Image (tube, rainbow, N blue to C red):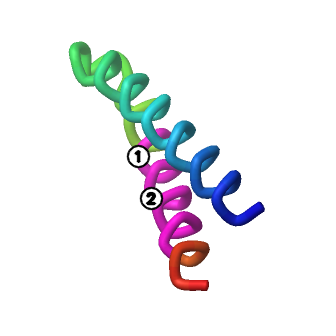
């Protein structure tokens, strides 16, 4: 169960990283999207680290 959650979180983080890379091409247009995606990546990384510890 824990491993499945870690794998899923890792996949979500990778998906968001790909998404943010697309937004970075046009930072003036996608400023809000970059901020939201960046926050979401931070949240997922924190969840991942918490699960890894237990």
Q: Which percent across, then down, holds residue 48?
A: 53, 64
Residue at left offset 47%, top offset 53%: 39
Our reading of the magenta stretch's main secondary structure is helix
Please tell me whether mark 1 sits on a helix, a strand or a loop.
helix
In the image, 44: left or right of 33?
Answer: right
Q: Which percent across, then down, holds residue 46?
A: 50, 69
Is 2 within the magenta?
A: no
**Residue 54 drawn above or below residue 42:** below
In the image, 11: left or right of 26?
Answer: right
Determine if residue 32 is in view.
Answer: no
Q: What's the CA distance linking mark 1 and mark 2?
A: 6 Å
Which residue, given by chain and number where applicable, does mark 2 sit on? 42
Q: Which residues are magenta?
A: 37-49
State the residue in front, 22 or 13.
13
Mark 1–mark 2 CB contact (< 8 Å): yes
Which residue, given by chain and number where applicable, does mark 1 sit on? 38
Q: Which percent across, then down, holds residue 10?
A: 50, 47
Residue at left offset 22%, top offset 15%: 25
Q: Quadrant of the C terminus?
A: bottom right
In the image, 5: left or right of 51?
Answer: right
Residue at left offset 29%, top offset 24%: 21
Q: Which mark is residue 19?
A: none
């Amino acid at each position: 169960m824990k491993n499945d959650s870690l794998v899923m979180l890792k996949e979500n983080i990778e998906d968001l990283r790909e998404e943010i890379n697309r937004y970075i091409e046009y930072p003036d247009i996608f400023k809000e999207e970059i901020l939201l995606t960046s926050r979401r990546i931070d949240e997922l990384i924190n969840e991942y680290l918490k699960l890894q510890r237990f």
